[in-house]
């Protein structure tokens, strides 16, 4: 039988340590843990990112690393477009909106091309963090043309889902969404918002929401903490 690589052994040792530590308890400090496991702090830090994105641990700046309760998972197919709130409603997860920022700004060149607006036009950019209890699990941003949504529209009743908001309003009439799925490292901004380490790997969705006239009315990006989500697609043979 082949020996485990250094990386495999480290992950196995960390898995055992986390499993033996009660939720809410703090792990040894990074220097002590690196020494205990016989690896460098850089190697340990990289391995810890894996367990952080799985929702197994949570690192708090200036406080330490804590073992967390194994998360309930939002599991869903992607054949039907549904909001995060709808998906969470079918599980034991109580989802709520955390920090919310709504700004009116000039459209970026990529947004102008996708939304078919002029470079001098503005968009309403809705950025928010979605949480389970006090744990950020998703970071969502939706830039929309100002003739689709205004700041005044969002003053009352917005709970986090642009999709649900537009469906309840009934206009524009929505038809289809085109979705790209990738993995992406967390930028400094997203890492701060989601309380994770920079460059932690997240699930990354980029979606174009079309109305019945074929116009893109929302060009959204979503970042998900992998340990809380399990997506699948049913594909027809042929």
Image (cartoon, grey):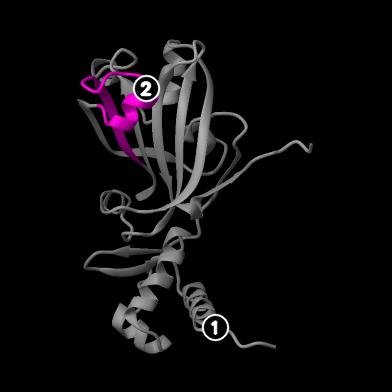
Give the image quarter of residue 150. top left
Give how far apart the Cα atoms at labels 1 and 2 are. 48 Å
Residue 127 visible in the current orientation? yes
x 60%, y 40%: residue: 76
Per the rendered image, the range of residues in magenta is 107-129
The residue identified by callout 1 is 5
Give the answer, above or below, for where 36 lies relative to 110.
below
Name the foreground residue: 56 vs 103.
Answer: 103
- In the displayed structure, does residue 224 sit left or right of residue 234? left
x 37%, y 22%: residue: 115
Give the answer, above or below, for where 216 lies relative to 172.
below
Name the foreground residue: 110 vs 144.
Answer: 110
x 45%, y 10%: residue: 170
| The C terminus: image quadrant | top right
Name the foreground residue: 16 vs 48.
Answer: 48
x 29%, y 20%: residue: 154
Asked if residue 151 lies in the magenta stretch, the reply is no
Mark 1 and mark 2 in contact? Answer it, CB < 8 Å: no
The picture places residue 133, in percent across and down from the top left corner, at: 38, 47
Circle 1: element type: loop
Mark positioned earlier in the residue sequence (1 or 2): 1
| The N terminus: image quadrant | bottom right
Q: Residues within 10 Å of mark 2 (few under 14, many from 20)?
A: many
The residue identified by callout 2 is 115
The picture places residue 196, in percent across and down from the top left corner, at: 33, 58
- In the displayed structure, does residue 173 sit left or right of residue 188? right
Q: Residue furthest right?
A: 238
Circle 2: element type: helix
């Amino acid at each position: 039988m082949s020996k485990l690589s250094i990386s495999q052994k480290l992950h196995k040792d960390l898995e055992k340590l986390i499993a033996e530590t009660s939720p809410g308890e703090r792990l040894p400090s990074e220097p002590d843990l690196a020494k205990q496991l016989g690896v460098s702090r850089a190697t340990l830090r990289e391995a810890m990112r894996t367990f952080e994105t799985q929702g197994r641990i949570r690192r708090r700046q200036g406080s330490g690393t804590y073992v967390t309760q194994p998360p309930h998972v939002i599991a869903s197919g992607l054949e039907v477009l549904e909001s995060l709130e709808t998906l969470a409603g079918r599980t034991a997860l109580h989802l709520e909106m955390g920090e919310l920022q709504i700004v009116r700004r000039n459209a970026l060149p990529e947004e102008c091309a996708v939304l078919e607006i002029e470079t001098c036009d503005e968009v309403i950019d809705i950025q928010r963090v979605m949480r389970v209890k006090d744990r950020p699990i998703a970071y969502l941003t939706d830039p929309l043309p100002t003739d689709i949504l205004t700041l005044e529209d969002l003053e009352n009743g917005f709970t986090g889902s642009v999709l649900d908001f537009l469906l309840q309003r009934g206009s524009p009439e929505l038809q289809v969404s085109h979705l790209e799925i990738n993995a992406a490292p967390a930028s400094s901004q997203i890492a701060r918002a989601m309380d994770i380490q920079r460059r932690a790997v997240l699930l990354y969705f980029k979606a174009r929401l079309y109305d019945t006239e074929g116009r893109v009315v929302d060009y959204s990006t979503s970042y998900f903490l992998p340990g809380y989500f399990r997506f699948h697609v049913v594909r027809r043979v042929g």
